[in-house]
Amino acid sequence: MKKIITVIFAAALFLSAASAQENYVPSQSNLDARQEFASTRLGIFLHWGIYAMYGQGEWYLRDGRLLDSEYSKAAKGFYPIEFDAAEWAKAFKDAGAGYVTLTSRHHDGFSMFKTATSDYNVVDGTPFGRDVVGELCQACADEGLRFHLYYSLLDWHREDYPLGETGRDTGRRKDRQDYDSYFNFMKIQLKELLTNYPHLGGIWFDGLWDHKEKTFDWRIQDLYAHIHSIKPSCLIGNNHHINVIKGEDFQIFERDLPGQNSTGWNSYDSVSDVLPLEMCTTMPNGAWGYEVKVTSYKSTEEIIILLLKSAALNSNLLINIGPQPDGNLPAQALDRLKGLGEWMRTYSSTINGTTATAIPEQAWGVSTRTRDKVFLHVIKPKEIPSNGVTGRLVVPVTEKVAGVKEFVSGKPLPFTVSKDGFLTITTPSKPDASPDWVVEIDLK
């Protein structure tokens, strides 16, 4: 487990801000935003920047062992003529998503918004000259979608960023590091984002893992206090792979469901039972940014199953797409969005606005609930015990059951409740699960 190290700073201003976050009490507007965020289980993640020009993923500056002076020339050719924020937002809305998270600035240091901090941004540094963040933020608002921004804590372009574990060979001089300067740069940019885009609802941090040494302090709670002082309702999440830090408003799990650690990255020892949760993963089976060689994508069914398993653990699913350099979303991504939309138009009420149940994941599937309903999501009908004619779903209940039916058809299903609190439901021997057959339990 990684530990959070508390360091005493001399600056009274910082001590005051850090103390404020140590004692952080979210505003009512923040609590309302958390509830809204958790009520729509599907989010769309977008990794887009000048790295799309190379078609090698968002880490190409480092992984390609390039000099930043050469890599950054891609900005002069970035002209995504097909980019249409309104079309993107409509596709996400039609897919049943409730929010969108876009990379405002990734590890390569290029900003996808106009900033006064440098001209290394999409408005001042490219022939495109348009504010991608601003256009998509407004388009999402027009569609009723929440809008969040990814923001990298590390930077392989700026020389004042202290050398971390990544991006050491991009050609930055080794005598220019100055965290006071870099920290001030981040505060300026974050203020720009929070004040220039009124519909912005959340900041998604990444990169804290770049400095593991105990002597380095990110002043992260000061940064959180800075954000909340400007916009108390703004939700803060941090993809740091460790336990929640005071001042964060939702907990992130990269490529893993909450409580799992198949990647080996997630070094937390607790899943919050207070904050909203979010699992993020890629739609293509590759990097987060566009990779020209990757044509293998998770199927619509695989994404739906991930969405169901996330919802059953009180978590959202943030599914990532890497837009192409011309401004189009890949055809495979559009196909999956269409499939998700078709499923969500029927089943969204069985995951949106729901919470976890006391029923753990079963061989046949998972469950979600509202105040007066429980939904059994049968993902693998073959795992329902069957006599060849009918099946039997058995689950524990602690509340009175008023009725049980197939969710789609509304057809009643026979059931009994034992004295020791087990509900037995008689099901068709081969229920139609493609990929999900839903049983609705009505509670008194």
Image: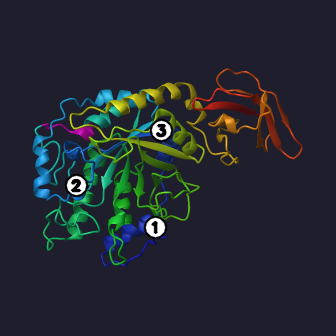
**Place of residue 159 in the rendered image (x, y in percent of width and height, measured from the top left):** 16, 65
Q: Which mark is residue 42?
A: 3
Point out the tag, 3 or 2, that comes first from the N-terminus. Answer: 3
Q: Which residue is mark 1?
A: 22
User: Is residue 358 visible to us here?
Assistant: yes
Whether 73 is drawn above or below 332: the answer is: below
Highlighted magenta segment, given as a residue range: 128-134
**Place of residue 75 in the rendered image (x, y in percent of width and height, measured from the top left):** 13, 45
Residue found 27% across the figure and 54% down from its top: 59
Label 3 and label 2: CA atoms lie apart by: 28 Å
Q: Which residue is mark 2?
A: 108
- Tell me if 16 is positioned left or right of 245 in this view: left
Q: Residues within 10 Å of mark 2 (few under 14, many from 20)?
A: many
The one nearer the camera, 152 or 82, is 82
Point out the tag, 1 or 2, that comes first from the N-terminus. Answer: 1
Question: Mark 3 belongs to which amino acid?
Answer: Leu
Residue found 31% across the figure and 27% down from its top: 87
**Place of residue 176 in the rendered image (x, y in percent of width and height, measured from the top left):** 14, 71
Whether 321 is drawn above or below 9: the answer is: above
Q: Secondary structure at mark 3?
A: strand
Question: Mark 1 belongs to which amino acid?
Answer: Glu
**Place of residue 53 in the rendered image (x, y in percent of width and height, measured from the top left):** 19, 42
The one nearer the camera, 287 or 269, is 287
Residue found 37% across the figure and 27% down from its top: 90
- Contact flag, marks 1 and 2 (Cβ < 8 Å): no
- Tell me if 352 is positioned left or right of 12 in this view: right
